[in-house]
Image (tube, rainbow, N blue to C red):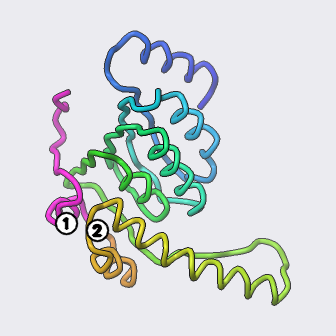
Amino acid sequence: MKRQDRDRQDRRDDDHESPIEIALVGDLTEAEADLTDRILGVEPGAECTIYFDSPGGSPYCGMSLVTLLKLRGIRATGIVTGECSSAALWPFAACVRRLVTPYSVLLFHPMKWQSEEHIGITEAAEWSRHFGALEKEMDVLLADLFGVQPATIDAWVKTHRYVTGHELAAAGLAEMISLQPLQR
């Protein structure tokens, strides 16, 4: 976000008593510094609204955002305005209220690891071990954040499942909303 856009948003936030609004759009990894800054701009224990339209990104970035929301006691309402996939699922699941539309799409899949560097076999083996353990822990955490049994998330992850807003709401993991102004 450009400095002037952030200043304009900050003035809107100061002028209204409504919660701060944060757009989590695009690749998490590319926007991590700005997203972290925006979440740190929410007072501990306060409310905010996070709009999600993201294909995901680094699992470490997704985990960092969850950690900030949880450790600071931020009461976030998450709204999937388009896509909320991969690593973006964790901060969405960390929201105390989750809203989807009939057009929302969420992709659950196993974690992917890639290296753009030439690495040796020992390092590759360690990364493989680390990611295997991390994936299991993160899937359990995702189920815990959503408040469901791990088998629900596991079934979606193993099949690389695109879950619709209707399906997520039917599973009790989010509220379905229509494309009408929200009641605050």
Residue depicted at x 31% and y 40%: 77
SS category of the residue bearing label 1: helix
The three-letter code of the residue at mark 2 reads Val
Residue depicted at x 24% and y 51%: 100
72 to 41, vertically: above or below:
below
Of residues 7 and 41, the one nearer the viewer is 41
| Mark-to-mark CA distance, 2 and 1 | 6 Å
Position of 108 with respect to 56 (left or right) is left
> For mark 1, does the 10 Å Cα neighbourhood hold few (<14), some (14 to 19), or many (20 or more) residues?
some
Q: Position of residue 179 (x, y in %)?
A: 18, 40
Specify the quadrant of the image occupied by residue 165.
bottom left
> For mark 2, does the 10 Å Cα neighbourhood hold few (<14), some (14 to 19), or many (20 or more) residues?
some
Which residue has dot 1 on it?
167
Which residue has dot 2 on it?
163
Position of 179 with respect to 50 (left or right) is left
125 to 184, vertically: above or below:
below
18 to 52, vertically: above or below:
above
SS category of the residue bearing label 2: strand
Specify the quadrant of the image occupied by residue 13.
top left
The three-letter code of the residue at mark 1 reads Glu
- Magenta residues (range): 164-184
Q: Position of residue 37 (x, y in %)?
A: 59, 34
Q: Is residue 167 magenta?
A: yes
Quadrant of the image containing the C terminus: top left
Q: Decide: marks 2, 1 in contact (CB < 8 A)?
A: yes
Q: Position of residue 91 (x, y in %)?
A: 43, 52
Report the number of discs.
2
